[in-house]
Image (spheres, coloured by chain):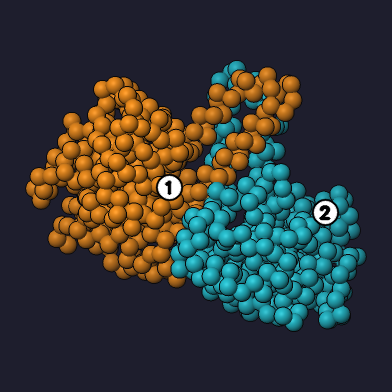
Chain colours: A cyan, B orange
Amino acid sequence: MVAPADLSAASQAANGPGLPVAVDAMGGDHAPAVVVEGARMAWERFGVPVLLVGRPEEIGDVGGIEVLSASEVIAMGAEPASSVRTLKDSSIVRGAEAVRDGRAKALLGAGNTGAAMAASLLRMGRIKGVARPAIAVPFPTFGSTPTTLLDCGANAQCQPEWLVQFAQLGSVYNRVRYGVQRPRVGVLSIGEEAGKGNDLIKEVCRLMESDSDWAHRCGAEFVGNVEGGDLMMGVADVIVCDGFTGNVVLKSIEGAMAVAQRQLRSALTSTAGSRVASEAIDPLVTPVFDTLDASKTGAAALLGTRGVCMIAHGSSSAETIANAIRTASEMADEGVVAQMRASFEASP
Amino acid sequence: MVAPADLSAASQAANGPGLPVAVDAMGGDHAPAVVVEGARMAWERFGVPVLLVGRPEEIGDVGGIEVLSASEVIAMGAEPASSVRTLKDSSIVRGAEAVRDGRAKALLGAGNTGAAMAASLLRMGRIKGVARPAIAVPFPTFGSTPTTLLDCGANAQCQPEWLVQFAQLGSVYNRVRYGVQRPRVGVLSIGEEAGKGNDLIKEVCRLMESDSDWAHRCGAEFVGNVEGGDLMMGVADVIVCDGFTGNVVLKSIEGAMAVAQRQLRSALTSTAGSRVASEAIDPLVTPVFDTLDASKTGAAALLGTRGVCMIAHGSSSAETIANAIRTASEMADEGVVAQMRASFEASP
């Protein structure tokens, strides 16, 4: 456990291994039932304690799981910033406060993504030196550790300097999470040659090449432009892009995979002969798609706030919620926030 | 065949059903052999005559296929615009000239995409009123006609007005190609609610909603924002985006599908039992991925030039080349360029 001297007492407490993960019980397509079930699985399977935040009467009987009462809920479609300001007793806001106050070591939300970001940003605060937090999603690759894509949607419109910071945040994350000692950082573009891209990306590449301070601060290596097709090929450990592009890419791949899986199932059950074979095959096919689904293997992490915040898909199953809780717990135990603070706050 | 009175004699001739499709024999990862084989297949299977353009000594014996000699080749990595200007006797430039001069009805290139665009733009010219041509890619959907995504890479940096024109070009294309009488046009964004997106997309939505002249000109219906996950779900017939986003999305999906197919094959051959089953399954699985691969089902079309230009993947097989030649021929026969001209050049 890393606990640099400059961390406040509250932050240190927030990183304590014995603390629970605060989980917004009211967020998600099938909340609170699926979230409660996921919390139970996290405790039973992984031994991670959970603090469920929400309306006790809706959460119901949860056995030994601790509940933090919050009377309001920020709906899926609600405007994030104003909702966080006005709904002060909402489950996601109370959850973020629990992390801030050292009552939980991390936050997980499966509801309104913007509200989870806003609550974390406003209640936990930003790491000093970070202009904007970003959403990081680990994409599975084969034969190597995941490739972290960020920003996957926190900032629809980006300044070039922010992407350089995303590279720094992503590199620390990748080293702490996956043990990559010298993360290779690529910039998502439309050709591998330098000079390819839109105005934003050209400027990002210029900044990243002209001043390597960011790379020194996080021990990264800049590998230049990468393309959409490289995302799952393991050619870079961290890939940066603006939040618009990242979100569109993430959802496009999810959608295409869902179509592929559906069509495969349909093809495999199209004839009597293939139906028989497909019974043998299905247990092999499903895990492949599950492994390829970034939303199932690891929830998205909001990087740049002074506390761990994870964001799960609204449609997450109890199992996915349980995995995300475990990941959030690990991130807190590994001291990822402290390492990011050290990277940004150290003298150049 | 539509042939409005305002078409020049050359353009009318260029749309002639009896004319060949000019094919850059020198472009592609395995050129000229695979391209020549694809040309032969196009003739034998579909009865589409081809004009192979390139170095006769490298093209070799092609039986009855017509060859147009061109001594130069624009390499895959070469800078497009300057190459087209200096390599006047290159295969892609001579191919574009063959369309301009009424010697061929369409052009197909599988080499340097930028060079194919530049050659078409400079030799065939732009449709009057079109600011920038765009690359359109039909994505397969299930239960409905393909969804055309554009721009997939012609313009890395876009003005909002251009995306409105892409909507118009894509709608005409979709009606002519797939018979969709009232194409539903969506704007690719990061949320379905109006007001979601980056600065470009917000302005595009504002333009498309505030003045419906573009929609009248192409008989389209604006359906607002769509997300990445909607691309293959059939929720819109035409989806517009800037060329940076479109190219990243296209390549991301291609890459993810390739990984999925590889992992599935590996899973299906992992045990003796599954190996047996996989022999029965493989003939069912491969067509699913082939159908889902936009680059196999239909080559990309450059829309906005005064002649049909199709662009195939550099790694295209002979079969893919043959399919692209057939598509190029059909597009010319269907008079897609004339219809686009009518849409843009008609009085408001």
Q: Note whether B53 is above or below B78 in the view shown.
A: above
Residue in view at x 31 percent, y 37 percent: B54
The residue positioned 33% from the left and 63% from the top of the image is B162
Instruction: Provide the secondary structure element on which disc 1 rests.
Output: loop
Of badges 1 and 2, nearer the viewer stands: 1
Snapshot quadrant of residue A188: bottom right
For the point 13% across and 44% down, the residue is B10
Q: In which quadrant is the C terminus of chain A drawn?
A: bottom right
Callout 1, which amino acid?
Met
The amino acid pointed to by label 2 is Ala
Cβ atoms under marks 1 and 2 closer than 8 Å: no
Residue A42 has which mark? 2
Instruction: Tell whether B137 sits left or right of B23.
Output: right
**Residue A224 quadrant:** bottom right
Q: Chain ID for label 1?
A: B
The image position of residue A322, as x and y in percent, is 78, 53
Left or right: B48 in relation to A179: left
CA–CA distance between discs 1 and 2? Answer: 52 Å
Q: Tag on residue B76?
A: 1
Q: Position of residue B341 (x, y in %)?
A: 19, 52
